[in-house]
Image (spheres, grey):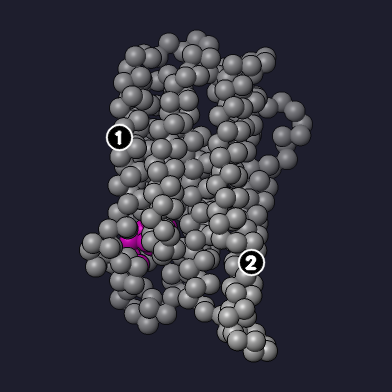
Amino acid sequence: MKTKNVKLLLFFFSISLLLIAVVNAAEGHSHGGPKCECSHEDDHENKAGARKYKIAAIPTVLVAGIIGVLFPLLGKVFPSLRPETSFFFVTKAFAAGVILATGFMHVLPEAYEMLNSPCLTSEAWEFPFTGFIAMIAAILTLSVDTFATSSFYKSHCKASKRVSDGESGETPVDSAKVQILRTRVIAQVLELGIIVHSVVIGISLGASQSPDAAKALFIALMFHQCFEGLGLGGCIVQGKFKCLSVTIMSTFFAITTPIGIVVGMGIANSYDESSPTALIVQGVLNAASAGILIYMSLVDLLAADFMHPKMQSNTGLQIMAHIALLLGAGLMSLLAKWA
């Protein structure tokens, strides 16, 4: 399988997940069937007050995402931001801490709350689906990571053999090229995990009827987009994508949450956050997103960087990276108080 084919596969897979989230969420809000006792039909929050936060959030969250994802790309202009520098390692550790806390403190608890809601009365939901779906998502992420890297490795071997003047035996594979290809897979899978959660939380903000809830989500989403974009941008830089690929990935990341907000505003009048369909769809997507984010942050971001020879040979850099990791995870965990 060629690099281009894998890119297309991941792109269309992410598009499919977004369409499923949007369509099913809309169906769940407008055709959710009988409403359980958890419905909030008696709420009379100031919808106009909430609407101003939603409208303000669209351009603000968009700009925050653009700033976050493009910041690591400034390494072409500022040498201190290049992937081989200590500052880049520390910044990436901070971003990885943010992504890790997003998975553990934001996405996974939300999925657990939704999939354990008393509104889901079927006995089938007594099974701990949240952890199960997150586990399966992490395993599938591992599979994509390993099989794609293996495919790139084998295709590179065959290409090397064809130019080896008919010599027998395997031609040594350039490990640097294989690492770049693997980093590209990491960036694409990480983006998939982030955007799945982004569209769900965007819909939540757009459909919110409470000014206080909308304000809290608005503030939290700015940090989400900026810091998650920082981690994704770092992976994009290390993957050495072409200009067109960088533009597509950055744009797709930046616009996902604003699109979710617009969709949420469109279905706000018929929104029922307690309908079984809405709970199941958002709960499953959040659980899957949590599994992807937790795996990517621990295995492909933190483990890869903290075991890097540059990090292992520099005690001062290790200390700074650990501090940045704890700071990123701590700040994002603190945001869980509000959203």
**Is residue 103 among what the camera can see?**
no
**Which residue of the protein is positioned furthest toward the left in this rendering?**
78
Report whether 68 appears left or right of 155.
left
Q: Which residues are magenta?
A: 89-96
Q: Is residue 107 visible?
A: yes
Tell me the amino acid under the disc marked 2: Ser
Asked whether 167 or 22 is in front, the reply is 167
* Residue at the image position 38 percent from the left and 78 percent from the top: 310
Residue to which mark 1 is pinned: 60
Query: 49 or 261, which lies in front?
Result: 261
The residue at 40%/33% (across/down) is 258
Give the labeled residue for mark 2.
151
* Image location of residue 131, percent across then percent down: 64, 47
Q: Is residue 334 magenta?
A: no
x%, y% of residue 74?
A: 27, 58
Image quadrant in which the C terminus is located: top left
- Which residue: 33% across, 45% down? 66
- Mark 1: amino acid: Thr
Q: Residues within 10 Å of mark 1 (few under 14, many from 20)?
A: some
